[in-house]
Image (cartoon, rainbow, N blue to C red):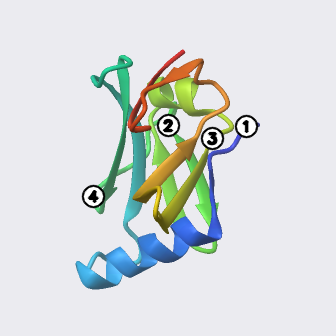
Amino acid sequence: MNEITISNRAFERIAEIRREKNIPEDAFLKVGVVSGGCSGLTYNLDFATDVTPGDQDQVFEKEGMKVLVDMRSYLYLAGTQLDYTDGLDGQGFHFNNPNASRTCSCGESFSI
């Protein structure tokens, strides 16, 4: 199975955001893909507390953090690593997606 993984830096930043915004520890991190951006598809991150995963949803876990991906998004994201950087090249979450054939210069959208 091609899991969606979270780097240690991204994990730490997500945990920090949870604390800052008082998001419950049992909330899912929802990772998805939506239409948009200059390359056609855009990544989406959100938290959800009232989600019951469906039969087709994929759920991954890292050190107690549950990551929920709907099946449509999973088809685009299989094998992707979520990372976080705070360097001079830009601060924020970055998706290292082996399925993307093209990305825009800002890294927020991609195409397959």
Task: Please identify the quarter of the rendering in which residue 98 is found.
Answer: top right
Residue lying at the far left of the rendered structure: 21
Mark 2 = which residue?
57
Drawn side of residue 109 relative to residue 37, left or right: right
Q: How far apart are marks 1 and 4 (CA)?
A: 26 Å
Label 4: how many Cα within 10 Å (few below 14, some 14–19, many 20+): few
Q: Which amino acid does label 2 sit on?
A: Asp
Drawn side of residue 37 relative to residue 67, left or right: left
Q: How far apart are marks 2 and 3 (CA)?
A: 16 Å
- Numbered tag placed on residue 14 in the rendering: none
SS of the residue at dot 2?
Answer: loop
Q: What residue type is labelled 1?
A: Asn
- Numbered tag placed on residue 80 in the rendering: 3
Q: Earlier in the sequence, mark 2 or mark 1?
A: 1
Q: Which amino acid does label 4 sit on?
A: Asp
Q: What x and y, as percent, mark residue 89?
A: 47, 56
Q: How far apart are marks 2 and 4 (CA)?
A: 15 Å
Q: What x and y, as percent, mark residue 11?
A: 54, 70
SS of the residue at dot 3?
Answer: loop
Point 30% across, 57% down: residue: 48
Mark 1 = which residue?
2
Label 1: how many Cα within 10 Å (few below 14, some 14–19, many 20+): few
Q: What x and y, as percent, mark residue 35?
A: 30, 21
Label 3: how many Cα within 10 Å (few below 14, some 14–19, many 20+): some
Drawn side of residue 43 relative to residue 84, left or right: left
Closest to the camera, between mark 1 and mark 4, is 1
For the C terminus, give its image quadrant. Answer: top right
Q: Which amino acid does label 3 sit on?
A: Thr
Mark 4 = which residue?
50
Q: How far apart are marks 2 and 1 (CA)?
A: 14 Å
